[in-house]
Amino acid sequence: IPASAPDSKLRLEWIHGYRASDCKNNVRYASNGDICYHAARAGIIYNPIEHKQRYNLDHTEDIVSFAMHPEGQLIATGEAGENPKVVVWDTDTMKAVSIMVGFHTTAVTQLAFSEDGNKLATVGQDPNRCLAVYDWRSGSKIFSS
């Protein structure tokens, strides 16, 4: 039996499922009509006309919170874990445009963009349910309690 890695590579084709048991308010329509949601560590965009999924895979732990930017093209997702991060990503490119990490512990359980879309509020699952408000474009924290 050869000890080297196989020549083939795995490619993600489809994610079955949706996280609903402990996450709420986490399905939205993007500005182009695609359906946005998450499962496990993946942000998912589903095009029902083409019956295709696209993925954002920037999380290293399970996603437990979700918010849609007011303009409908950006999504913020927050994860569980000891040093959880918040990823703001583009629904067209599927790439992260901002990552915030270092304030919350345990999980980021709630996310909300401000009405004008310039700020992002995050709430942690720590015992005090700490709140942070970010200028998400720069990743800088402008308020915390």
Image (cartoon, rainbow, N blue to C red):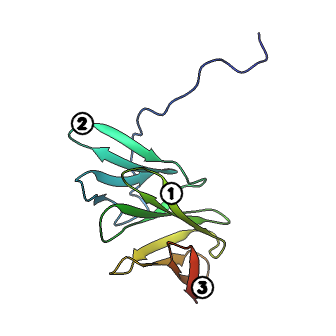
Could you tell me if the residues under marks 1 and 3 are in contact, i.e. CB atoms within 8 Å? no
Callout 2 secondary element: loop
Would you name the residue on which mark 2 appears?
50
Q: Quadrant of residue 75?
A: bottom left
Q: Residue at x 66, y 72 (%)?
A: 102
Q: Residue furthest right?
A: 3
Q: Residue at x 41, y 78 (%)?
A: 118
Would you name the residue on which mark 1 appears?
96
Q: In terms of sequence position, does the residue under pointer 1 or pointer 2 come before the other?
A: 2
Question: Seen in the image, is 62 located left or right of residue 81?
Answer: left
- Cα distance between the residues tagged 2 and 3: 45 Å
Q: How many marks?
A: 3
Horizontal and vertical percent for residue 117?
37, 76
Q: Residue furthest top?
A: 1
**Above or below, 16 relative to 97:** above
Quick one: 46 or 90, which is closer to the camera? 90
Horizontal and vertical percent for residue 68?
35, 66
Question: Seen in the image, is 1 located left or right of residue 82?
Answer: right
